[in-house]
Image (tube, grey):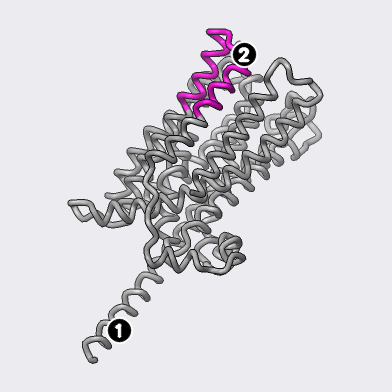
Amino acid sequence: NAATLGMTIYCTYIGCFYLATMATTPPSLVIPICIVGAAIGGIGGGFVWTAQGAYFTRASEEYAASSLDKKSISDANSMLGGIFACIYLLGEVTLNLFSTVSVKVFNLTWSQVYGVYFSLAVMSVLGMMTFVQNFKYDEVDKKHQDQHAFKKATAAAQLFFNDPKMKYMIGLNAAFGFSSAFLNSFVFGEVLTLSSSLKNPSAVVGIFGSVVASVAAIMSIVFGTIACKKGKGFVLNIGAWSFFMVPFLFVIKPNTESWGWFSLLFVSVMMGVGRATFESTLRAVFADFFSHEKEGAFANIIVQSGVSSVVGFWLSVNLPCHHSGMYCIKFRDGGLHNTLAFEVITMVTSLFAIFGFRRAAALYRQEMRVDESTKDVQRINTLAV
């Protein structure tokens, strides 16, 4: 129900941009409508992604219980996480290409494109209400629903402050947020323009963006399989190193004019590999580590990665320098910006993500041993009675 509510709010979000791009909309109202739409979209995203995480965890539990090969819940999380991320990312690629082709080739207006998006969003809500199974509450869910309203509303904050594992998971979410901001603001926003081998940057940015999402979609399935065999930690390490490589390549090759198709495609692939681990394996790990508080866990993913992205975009344009050089680059806004500082911040965050996850995993294993010991004591007491 929460996911359906969030999707309905998303329809309003898309509707705002549809309204803003209509020819009959007064120019003075375009920006206010977009701002209101963005705020509404943020609210809808909070509902959708938090509910999606809880639903995903429950679906994995149901699948593991009914699978013929007796899959563990952890393996079910890995497999279903990969499938979900693949479908989600392929949808993103398809709709991105649709807008590009519609505007560039068929000369559709952006109002018409948003009209199609709005129609698809409404159809998705109707499909959600009609075809998606709404799981019945079990005893654990009922107990959770009976919690005080304030406790449910602050579940994300309580989990962050009370569960030490959550603090160590910040690095992985922050690495994704910083890398995404670096790629979209600096690489796609500035490097494409400064490159001497790209003649029409605005026309190719969609291609590189599609490469990121396409690689992420393919690798989500691959990583889902690898996680079952090698472990989720192995996959998340690959993701963290991929996030590390995105800015590192610009540290060792700071001359933006020398960047061409091959090098920019390689950066896009690195980001795609990292994003695959974020969209699939990381969510599966959160489902493992915080199964006792699903909503709060997945709300933390949204908050941590969202705040990191905002901070990342702010850093990308607010780290000034005074003398033009290899790491002091003139952006399109006319100012000189210190690219090395943001690159180092992103790389250090990616390294912290690796060690942070290891610490969180150690705490989780310790919790599992305590739980097993408690169960053994209970069994002994039962037999004694």
Q: Going by the image, does 377 lie left or right of 353?
A: left
Q: Find residue 109 and name its label.
A: 2
The disc label shown at residue 377, or none: 1
Name the residue nearer the viewer: 2 or 285.
2
- Residue 123 location in percent, x, y? 47, 30
| Residue at horizontal 66 percent and vertical 43 percent from the top | 310
The mark total stands at: 2
Residue 264 at least partly seen: no
Secondary element type, mark 2: loop
Magenta highlight: main SS? helix
Q: Residue 133 versus residue 341: which sits nearer the camera?
A: 133
Q: In this view, does 339 lie above or below 55?
A: above
Residue 118 covered by magenta stretch = yes
Give the residues in magenta.
Answer: 93-120
Q: Which of marks 2 and 1 is nearer the N terminus?
A: 2
Q: Residue at x 81, y 24 (%)?
A: 28
Amino acid tagged 2: Thr
Is the residue marked by circle 1 packed among few (<14), some (14-19), or many (20+) residues within 10 Å?
Answer: few
Give the farthest residue toward the bottom.
385
Q: Where is residue 147 in the image (x, y as percent from the top left)?
A: 53, 68
Left or right: 49 in relation to 79? right
Q: Is residue 136 above or below residue 369?
A: above
Residue 286 to residue 270: above or below: below
Position above or below: 337 against 1: above
Determine the secondary structure under disc 1. Answer: helix
Amino acid identity at mark 1: Val
Q: Position of residue 381 (x, y in %)?
A: 27, 88
